[in-house]
Image: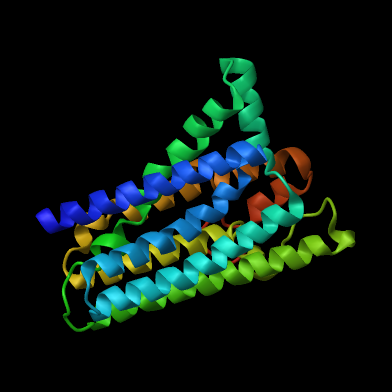
Amino acid sequence: MTEYAQLLLQNLALSGGLFILLWLVNLRTRDPSFIDSWWALGMVVIAWATYLFVGHTGAHATLITVLCTIWGLRLGLYLLWRWRKHGPDKRYVTLMAAARKERGWGYAKASLLMVFALQWPLQFIVSLPVQLGQMGGAKPLSPVAWLGAGLALVGIAFESLGDLQLVAFKANPANVGNVLQSGLWRYTRHPNYFGDACVWWGLWVIAVDAGVGLWSMPGPILITVLLTRWSGVPTVEGNMRRKRPDYEAYVRRTSSFVPMPPRKI
């Protein structure tokens, strides 16, 4: 148990230090939007920090680290590209303006307390399967672990394809003001979020097979709640309902999260 506590405290301190460093960078950019990319890239850092701390090449540790790296690099670099291409995220612009107007906070305090200090513990908790799943020793992978790996790979492919379809849709000027309703978006209104959840539940299954993964269950539960109840679906759909007149019909036809055949209206 002491070894587990040491690992978690080490990763918590490492993650916190990096968030503070990024907050200082943000004071120069005056735009915290890039933190979304760090949500994924920071998970990769935590995975490799754990792998080095554990100090062995057990199959579970290697599998978890590789899958987390594939997921995190793909998503993190995509979000970084999106930020550089499209500029500040309107969610953060609104958040900073509200903090200044309603609370009287300056930019430094608002960005620290409402963005960086908030995402630090959330990232740490979500990444629990990547941390604790590497502590199970050098036991062989069972079919359960391969099931988890398959689920994670499906999730990576699902959200990658969903993001690719959305980028292609937005790149076509004829689609301005319209709602993407084809491809994966025909079966779920949020294929990227669904894929994300699959990745973390898959990593948790691998952690369970390693022997200590049950303690990391708060991770996949938290990411599912964040995606479906807080910063994911509610935020996107609130904006879409205000800006896209045909979005309500799309909502009535299409599953919110888990892919399902479209409903007939």
- Residue 146 at x, y = what percent? 32, 81
Quarter of the view holding residue 133: bottom left
Q: Please tell me how many numbered marks the rendered image carries.
A: 0
Q: Is residue 149 left or right of residue 244?
A: left
Residue shown at the point (43%, 66%) measured from the top left: 199
Which of the two residues, 150 or 45, is positioned nearer the viewer here?
45
Residue shown at the point (49%, 65%) measured from the top left: 72
- Residue 36 at x, y = what percent? 56, 50
Q: Is residue 131 left or right of residue 92?
A: left
Q: Quadrant of the N terminus?
A: bottom left
- Residue 83 at x, y = what percent? 68, 53
Residue shown at the point (41%, 73%) measured from the top left: 67
Which of the two residues, 200 or 240, is positioned nearer the viewer here?
200
- Residue 250 at x, y = what percent? 69, 53
Q: Can residue 241 be seen from the camera position used here?
A: yes
Is 218 above or below relative to 26? below
Which of the two residues, 176 or 244, is positioned nearer the viewer here?
176
Q: Is residue 10 left or right of residue 255?
A: left
Which of the two residues, 265 or 91, is positioned nearer the viewer here?
91
